[in-house]
């Protein structure tokens, strides 16, 4: 299932108990589980006690389940790694990190203080700027910082707050004290990962332990929601998660979080600003937005006033914020507080702004703009890391920053630091504490850092009780960079035993208003659901056609007529996929060989529209685009349909040459079952929301296209009643059993046509699809001023009327040329009306989502 | 000199535009050498939303949103300004360039910070090692800043060819430096990159030139559209405006619209449209001495 899965220690280690007993902390380094004398720390005793009883096989079995859940949820790549080059799979370690209640209280208080402090710094920098005017903060750190967004200066923010989501990467020093390694104020990622990891890991750990001793995460997310309500000043605000789409590294986490919180996941083009207010484009029209959770870097949020080359923004957003009609969290420009260059000044700023002592120290950092610091740094360059403070966000048009956003290097450009010290920072490395890691090498201590998440609730900041620990294997001689290191670890914060286990936060929400409508459907999502349905059906159609053909090809006993039938019935799909017809050599040879070659092209070629692989790829793409609308089960089913499974074309062994293609029958069976399961989920488990209507319409239209194409193939030269075409068509359309139960004779054209074209009780017939489409269309939102029939209603009604009037006998009647003109005309009519139907639906419901956006500044370039 | 300025921008779209947002820096700002007597900005179609305010740098700015479907947009700005020439200051009597940043850093008054902020790179300015080396030729240690900046301006004028159509607003400075050609905003960004690499405050100025030169003088390059140049902080001499496109100290034939860190802060007409397909733009700028020309009423508006 999962090739990256590495076995946990097997039979070589008879019990987990011996591993826990044999675990030794590293010399002189703080270990989370064991004290220097080798004793378990008290807060680990219960968990270790429970795990000691497990056999390694049992542990491994549980672990496999965790990995499968993570994979199926799409938590597959590491969002913290920089750039594409370092893309690596996300891996979760089997053991959690435990943090005692006392440690946590300290960390929690320190991080809340830090969030308040950084928010106050932001308020000053984007307001009066007393800190730089009074010299409390060196002016270059604000005025020269690319994260200081001037258009956002003086912009009002709801409740006076700019920092709503804050994350800190913390580490523990040898003496057990916590230090902040990095503050993250722009748009901290990982909260969704922490939640997913927790849910996955629950499967592998003793239930009673989690239930009784570990603080739950749900209360935090509830508090976050209350914070959004307070921000909007209403109990049920419309909250949007603004993402830059599936290419963004954190996209799966965005969609996961959106679904968990019940928010709409949107991209820039789903939103529009009118009358200085932000609206979501939904199927039912424009809906005002109250809160935008920004998962797009601030500079890319408004091409009008911020970076003009960003396709992910919402033009006019800054003006809307200025008008006070929408809250953006974090406020645009909050990344200013990300910079490590604030660190040396935080103790002073804390006293000045909060009148408190700074509780959590920061990693030792020097700003080289001050002469004293600069000469210290220049004197110790060999031991320090340096970086250009202003390189982050240095995204000047047309250039790339080759060093990545947060490139620290050991040593540094001495000359530049001397001349332009204000642009350089230096920091010391730190020895991090270790935590036990369970892997193929057994149980061993590995250094780690922890990302903790803080959010603004309705009433002050709250800290997520848990977080994302990140292993930092000691091989890197560098200080700390969350992006560069190893596997993740879930973090469990233990309850305060003195307070008992009743400390679970129980929030009482106000009476919930009953609602039977789902979240609004952005037009673009409707569009994607429509295509998801369409691709699912297309994939099934291709698989069915290929499977039935292969079954005939691999069986030498089958008569040649069966091969002729394949040739005839698959002609439409092979033509659509632009598969090369048989050439002269092939025609001269064995027919089976050329059919295998052509089916192989259809299945294995990666770049064929209507080929199987590209169809599965599109299926996966549309599924990921609509993930926040799919149930976890549907998503898992679709994740199992992988185009890679059809990536390897079996070689044709010569002679006897028909080796390979039969080998994929198993995969085809499995694929068809998965698709059936997916459509079953749609029928049984989806509420009949607009989303469902679009999903099913996509499916129905595609099925009509496929069935009518199959029937059209029967019109080709030769009599379909003479070869095996009718049986093949019935088989592909999954109607052979029905046919057999009605007619005990060899298939004939008239009853086959009746069953697949006109019979409204057969879920595979064209008439059935059109009836379903008419019902769907009747349910779709309409412009209330438009009282007539819509264009798509008319198209479907016309097609249905045509089918109702059709008479089987006259459809089958041969014309003077031996063809069947009645049938031919009907099929042609359907073949041209179906695309017109898709176009009409697209125009009405999807088109305003892809309005072209362009920046016209270039037109007025000065000379 | 008093001038009447008219600046008319016409966009014609091949397909209808459903909604468009614009930021306009089209009303001349008031400053030491310039009195902005009046200015009007109008659009056709009329905007549904409009706000006239002042940006971070103190420039007048107008936001408009046009919400009715249109295939043509006309933006017209009319203004009258009174411009005085700068006072003469001997370039040799300005502070050594390499003392300026440190000097400014000592004083965190608001007025001083407003200068200091232009010493840092901005999205359109960035200097490679090669460009820094090019700049340093004019900036040996201890040289008076204005003297060095004048030479820098002269060298850019001499080393680079004015050629429209080879660059766009998004052409990086490095490309301009390599190809040795460009238009006024390229030269301005290039000179700003050089100056800021040396930690010298320098700002980007957007404006106009007198359209018809006085008798006996040559018409300046860039006079039939909006223009751009740089302003360098020369301590004793204050801000000194230099035009690398024409190798000149800016006098009273340059009308200032706005200043910022670079083009991105203050482009005269900026906009985002939905729909529209292809577009053609037509810009007409006319700057005439107010005494000799009657004030024109709005045309076609």
Image: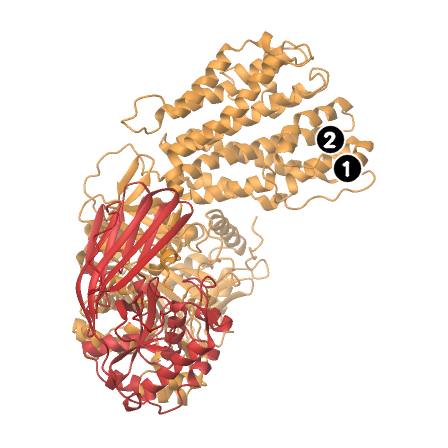
Residue for point 56% across, 35% down: A539
Residue A155 at least partly seen: no
| Subunit of label 1 | A
**Left or right side of A62 for A126:** left
- Between B234 and A838, the one lying in front of the other is B234
Characterize the local packing of mark 2: few (<14), some (14-19) or many (20 or more) Cα atoms within 10 angstroms.
Answer: many
Q: CA distance from mark 1 to mark 2?
A: 9 Å
Badge 1 and badge 2 both on one subunit: yes
- Between B161 and A163, the one lying in front of the other is B161
Q: Which chain is red?
A: B
**Left or right side of A36 for A85:** right
Residue that mark 1 sits on: A658
Q: Secondary structure at mark 2?
A: helix
Query: How far from the left and from the top, in percent, is residue A3?
Result: 58, 53
Vertical relation: B104 (above or below) A854: below
- Between A648 and B261, the one lying in front of the other is B261
Quadrant into which the C terminus of chain A falls: bottom left
Residue that mark 2 sits on: A553
Query: How far from the left and from the top, in percent, is residue B120?
Result: 33, 75
- Between A350 and B25, the one lying in front of the other is B25
The answer to whether marks 1 and 2 mark residues whose Cβ atoms lie closer than 8 Å is: yes
For chain A, the rendered hue is: orange
Q: Name the image quarter holding residue A141.
A: bottom left
| Subunit of label 2 | A
């Amino acid at each position: 299932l999962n090739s990256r899965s590495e076995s946990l220690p097997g039979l070589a280690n008879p019990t987990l108990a011996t591993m826990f007993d044999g675990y030794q902390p590293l010399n002189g380094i703080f270990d989370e589980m064991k004290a220097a004398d080798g004793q378990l720390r008290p807060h680990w005793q219960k968990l270790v006690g429970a795990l000691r009883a497990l056999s390694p096989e049992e542990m491994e079995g549980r672990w496999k389940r965790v990995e499968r859940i993570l994979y199926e949820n799409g938590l597959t790549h590491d969002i913290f790694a920089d750039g594409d080059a370092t893309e690596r799979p996300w891996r979760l370690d089997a053991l959690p990190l435990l943090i005692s209640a006392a440690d946590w209280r300290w960390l929690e208080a320190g991080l809340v203080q830090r969030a308040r402090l950084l928010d106050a710094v932001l308020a000053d920098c984007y307001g009066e700027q007393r800190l730089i005017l009074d010299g409390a903060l060196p002016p270059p750190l604000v005025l020269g910082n690319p994260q200081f967004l001037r258009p956002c200066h003086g912009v009002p923010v709801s409740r006076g707050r700019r920092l709503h989501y804050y994350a800190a990467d913390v580490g523990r020093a040898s003496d057990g004290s916590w230090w902040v390694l990095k503050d993250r104020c722009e748009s901290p990622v990982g909260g969704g990962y922490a939640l997913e990891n927790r849910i996955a890991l629950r499967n592998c750990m003793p239930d009673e332990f989690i239930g009784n001793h570990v603080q739950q995460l749900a209360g935090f997310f509830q508090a976050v929601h209350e914070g959004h309500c307070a921000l909007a000043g209403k109990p049920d605000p419309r909250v949007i998660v603004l993402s830059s789409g599936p290419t963004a590294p954190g996209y799966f986490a965005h969609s996961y979080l959106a679904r968990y919180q019940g928010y709409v996941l949107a991209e820039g083009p789903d939103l529009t600003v009118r009358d200085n207010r932000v609206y979501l484009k939904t199927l039912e029209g424009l809906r005002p937005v109250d809160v935008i959770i920004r998962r797009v870097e601030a500079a890319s949020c408004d091409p009008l006033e911020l970076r003009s080359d960003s396709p992910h923004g919402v033009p006019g957003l800054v003006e809307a914020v200025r008008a006070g009609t929408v809250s953006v969290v974090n406020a645009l420009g909050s990344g200013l507080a990300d910079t490590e260059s604030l660190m040396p000044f935080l103790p002073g700023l804390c006293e000045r702004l909060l009148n408190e002592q700074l509780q959590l120290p920061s990693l030792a950092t020097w700003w080289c703009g001050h002469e004293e610091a600069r000469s210290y740094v220049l004197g110790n360059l060999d031991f320090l890391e340096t970086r250009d403070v202003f390189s982050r966000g240095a995204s000047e048009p047309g250039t790339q920053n080759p060093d990545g956003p947060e490139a620290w290097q050991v040593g540094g450009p001495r000359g530049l630091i001397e001349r332009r010290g204000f642009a350089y920072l230096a920091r010391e490395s730190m020895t991090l504490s270790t935590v036990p890691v369970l892997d193929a090498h057994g149980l061993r201590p590995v250094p780690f850092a922890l990302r903790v998440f803080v959010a603004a609730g309705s009433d002050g900041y709250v800290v997520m009780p848990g977080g994302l620990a990140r292993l930092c294997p000691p091989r890197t001689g560098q200080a700390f960079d969350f992006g560069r290191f190893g596997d993740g670890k879930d973090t469990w914060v233990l309850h305060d035993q003195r307070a008992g286990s009743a400390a679970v936060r129980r929030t009482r929400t106000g009476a919930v208003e009953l609602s039977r409508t789902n979240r609004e459907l952005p037009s673009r999502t409707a569009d994607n659901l429509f295509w998801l349905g369409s691709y699912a059906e297309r994939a099934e159609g291709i698989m069915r056609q290929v499977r039935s053909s292969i079954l005939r090809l691999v069986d030498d006993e089958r008569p040649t007529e069966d091969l002729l039938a394949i040739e005839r019935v698959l002609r439409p799909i092979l033509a659509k996929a632009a598969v090369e017809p048989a050439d002269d050599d092939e025609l001269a040879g064995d027919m089976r060989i050329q059919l295998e070659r052509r089916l192989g092209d259809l299945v294995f070629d990666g770049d064929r529209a209507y080929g199987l692989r590209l169809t599965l790829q599109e299926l996966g793409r549309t599924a990921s685009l609509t993930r926040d609308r799919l149930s976890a089960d549907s998503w898992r089913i679709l994740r199992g349909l992988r185009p890679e499974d059809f990536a390897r074309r079996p070689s044709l062994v010569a002679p006897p040459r028909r080796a390979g293609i039969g080998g994929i029958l198993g995969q085809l069976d499995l694929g068809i079952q998965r698709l059936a399961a997916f459509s079953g989920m749609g029928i049984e488990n989806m509420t009949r929301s607009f989303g469902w209507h679009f999903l099913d319409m996509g499916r129905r239209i595609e099925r009509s296209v496929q069935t009518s194409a199959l029937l059209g193939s029967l019109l080709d030269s030769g009599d379909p009643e003479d070869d095996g075409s009718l049986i093949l068509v019935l088989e592909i359309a999954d109607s052979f059993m029905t046919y057999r139960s009605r007619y005990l004779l060899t298939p004939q054209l008239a009853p086959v046509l009746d069953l697949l074209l006109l019979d409204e009780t057969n879920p595979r017939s064209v008439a059935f699809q059109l009836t379903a489409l008419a019902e769907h269309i009747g349910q779709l939102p309409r412009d209330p001023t438009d009282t007539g029939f819509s264009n798509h209603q008319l198209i479907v009604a016309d097609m249905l009327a045509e089918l109702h009037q059709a008479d089987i006998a006259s459809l089958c009647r041969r014309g003077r040329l031996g063809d069947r003109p009645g049938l031919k005309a009907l099929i042609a009519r359907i073949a041209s009306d179906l695309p017109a139907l898709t176009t009409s639906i697209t125009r009405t419901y999807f088109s305003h989502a892809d309005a072209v956006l362009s920046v016209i500044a270039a037109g007025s370039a000065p000379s | 000199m008093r001038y009447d300025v008219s600046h008319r921008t016409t966009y014609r779209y091949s397909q209808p535009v459903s909604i468009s947002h614009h930021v306009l820096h089209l009303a001349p700002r008031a400053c030491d050498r310039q009195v902005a007597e009046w200015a009007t900005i109008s659009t056709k179609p009329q905007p549904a939303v409009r706000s006239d305010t002042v940006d971070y740098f103190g420039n007048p700015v107008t936001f408009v949103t046009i919400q009715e479907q249109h295939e043509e947009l006309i933006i017209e700005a009319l203004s009258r300004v009174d411009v005085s020439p700068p006072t003469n200051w001997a370039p040799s009597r300005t502070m050594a360039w390499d003392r300026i940043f440190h000097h400014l850093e000592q004083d965190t008054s608001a007025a001083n910070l407003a200068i200091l902020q232009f010493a840092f790179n901005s999205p359109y300015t960035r200097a490679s090692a090669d460009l820094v080396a090019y700049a340093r030729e004019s900036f040996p240690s201890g040289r008076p800043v204005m003297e060095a900046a004048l030479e820098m301006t002269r060298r850019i004028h001499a080393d680079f060819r004015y050629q429209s159509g080879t660059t766009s607003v998004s052409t990086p400075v490095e490309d301009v430096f390599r190809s040795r050609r460009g238009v006024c905003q390229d030269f301005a960004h290039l000179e700003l990159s050089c100056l800021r690499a040396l930690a010298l405050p320098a700002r980007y100025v957007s404006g106009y030139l007198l359209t018809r030169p006085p008798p006996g003088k040559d018409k300046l390059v860039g006079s039939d559209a909006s223009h751009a140049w740089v302003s360098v902080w020369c301590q004793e001499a204050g801000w000194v405006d230099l035009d690398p496109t024409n190798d000149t100290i800016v006098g009273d034939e340059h009308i200032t619209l706005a200043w910022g860190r670079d083009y991105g802060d203050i482009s005269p007409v900026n906009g985002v449209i939905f729909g529209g397909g292809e577009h053609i733009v037509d810009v007409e700028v006319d700057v005439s001495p107010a005494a000799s020309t009657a004030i024109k009423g709005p045309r076609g508006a």
